[in-house]
Amino acid sequence: MSYIDPKTVLSPRGSVGDVEVVFNTGPTANSWSIAKLTWEGEPAVGIRWNGDGEAERGVGSPQARGNPTWFIVPGELAECVLEQAETLAKQTNQNLEAAYREMAADDQRETEAQEWCEGLIANAPQER
């Protein structure tokens, strides 16, 4: 199924609002996300499968009449699910920051990237 950005999942319109994605695995195979949102005017936690990038296979799950929707986590589980999603988000951000620091510290890689970027300039169309 195609990847659906969870920020855009606002169906059913009369029930879902104020979607704040807390954790999203992104456009990967078996992509999923968790969000804080309002459901029929009340705070809630939603979860969904976002799809996997194969456009001909749908809009993720759950869905209603071909429109992507959220599964509303039962109130008894909402806090636990939200806490774990926030922990995953922090871990992911820390891992990403560490990877960026490692890449920036690699002088050879930075030099190669700079040369590659400068090489693109030669391929740019000239102004008329």
Image: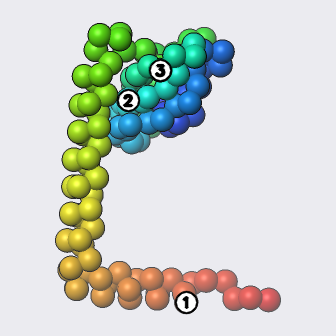
Q: Is residue 128 above or below residue 36?
A: below
Residue that appears at 29% across and 33% down: 85
Question: Percent x, y for residue 89?
Answer: 29, 43
**Number of marks present in the image shown:** 3
The residue depicted at 49 percent of the width and 26 percent of the height is 37
* First in residue order: circle 2 vs circle 1: 2
Question: Helix, strand or loop at disc 3?
Answer: strand
Q: CA distance from mark 2 to mark 3?
A: 14 Å
Q: Position of residue 49 (x, y in %)?
A: 39, 25
Mark 1 or mark 3, whichever is nearer to me: 3
> CA gap, disc 1 to disc 3?
54 Å
Q: Amino acid at mark 3?
A: Pro
Residue tagged 1:
122
| Crowd tier of the residue under label 3, counting other residues whose Cα lies within 10 Å: few below 14, some 14–19, many 20 or above | some
Q: Amino acid at mark 2?
A: Ile
Residue assigned mark 2: 34
Image x and y of residue 52, in percent: 40, 34
Q: Nearer the viewer, residue 109 or 94?
A: 94
Residue with the most extreme front position: 42
Q: Which of the numbered marks, if any, corresponds to residue 43? A: 3
Which disc number belongs to residue 97? Answer: none
Q: Is residue 45 visible?
A: yes
Query: In which quadrant of the rendered image does the C terminus lie?
Result: bottom right
Q: Amino acid at mark 1?
A: Ala
Q: Dot 2 lies on which element?
A: strand
Label 1 environment density (alpha carbons within 10 Å; few <14, some 14–19, many ≥20): few
